[in-house]
Structure formats: C-alpha cells, structure tokens
Amino acid sequence: MSRLFIVFVLALWLLGLTGCTLLPEQTPQRVFLLSPAEQDTASEVVHDKVLRVEKPEAPFPLTTSRILVSPTGKEISFYGGARWADRTPPLVAAYMVEALRQDGRVASVISDSSSARSQVSLVSQLGALQSEYPSQGTDGPPEAFIRLDVQLMEDVNRDIIASRRFQARQPSEGEDIEAVVDAMNQAMEVLSREVVDWVVEQLTPRHSLEQGS
C-alpha cells in the first residue's frame, strides 16, 4: 500500500470527523403550496352523481414544479430557489377537487387516481399559471395570470356536456417570491370559484333539461 494512498484515506477520515464535504453545498429550494382557503360548505346538494376531476393537460414547462415568470410576454423563465409542492397539473387538479368538495353542492368529487366509478368528468387544459409583468414595461411588481379551458364530459360515452375558458389575473404586492405566490393563490381562488359555480350550473337538472330540449 503506497504512502500516498494512506495519506488520502486519512484526509477523507479527517473530513468526515469535521463534518466537511468535498462536494459544493446546494442552495435549498423553498417549497410553496397552491391550496384553497377554508370555506363553509354549502348546505344544499344539487347534484348527486360522482364527479371525477382529471389532471389538466399542459405544455412544457407547465408540466414541471417550477414557479414560472414571463418577464417580457415572449419569454418564459422561473424563480430560482423555489418550486411548487408538486408538478403543476396534479397541483391544479388537487386544488379543484378540494374547492368542489368544500363547496359541497356536488355530492361526491373524486380525483382521477380513484378506482370509484363516476358518471361525469371535469377535464381541462392548463394554458398558463405564471407571473407576468405589465405590457408597458417591467417597472413595478408582476401580476399572477392563470388560464384554464375546461370541459364537462359524460363518462359513459365521452360526450361533452359543456365547455368554457376561464382566466384570472391578480396583481402582486411585490416582486419577491412570497408576494408572487400569494397573488397566484388569490388568482386561483377566483378562477376555481368561477369553475365551481359553472360546474354546478351545468349539472343542475333544470339546466340539463334546457340543453336537451
């Protein structure tokens, strides 16, 4: 055994004792949530079928867990050192499931991972979930922007009952990541409330009869 090898082993042993590492330390990422605020459940159930909420389709980079920013409108980037708690499509789906359950007017709401049978599905395409700077320039804080195209679909034959595009914008109170995430949560709350009301309206018996006539 060579003397150089012994010196190398001793050096590694001493580094272990002192808690040092030969590898550069990575900056820990901050993990943020996109989740609905608690609200009172509606007392009246207007639809007693099982509604399945499927994960939205999305283009890259919306399929990642990165928190996106569009600084110029023609460029997409992301905030360093921060990410969502999950990839964006399942995060949005989980948000919609919880929002519908909290609303309570649809009796049973399940995710697409459930093995339970459903009669109706909420499918969607996520077009944007990002912060954007005003078109007149990059001075000042950005605003959160979310766009979601949704369709209600009969599970038995996959016929579309109704479809609609939803959009929401919410100015951020600052350029820091905390303010941006707060704005995105507020925009998502507004958008999800509109989606929930629309879903309930489409599934009410009177509305269904009007569409079929």
Image (tube, grey):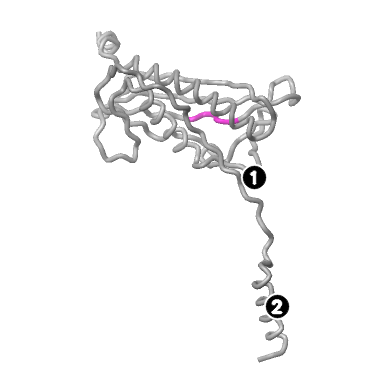
Which x, y percent locates residue 190? 50, 20
Please determine whether, in this image, residue 12 is positioned above or below residue 22: below
Q: What is the magenta range?
A: 126-130
Residue underneath mark 1: 81
Give SS at disc 2.
Answer: helix
Q: Nearer the viewer, residue 5 or 103?
A: 103
Q: Quadrant of residue 177?
A: top right
Disc 1 or 2, which lies upstream in sequence?
A: 2
Q: Quadrant of residue 74?
A: top right
Question: Would you say 28 lies left or right of 96 here?
Answer: right
Residue underneath mark 2: 11
Q: Amino acid at mark 1?
A: Gly
Q: Amino acid at mark 2?
A: Ala
Question: Would you say 97 lies left or right of 23 here?
Answer: left
Q: Nearer the viewer, residue 145 or 108?
A: 108
Please determine whether, in this image, residue 121 is positioned above or below residue 190: below
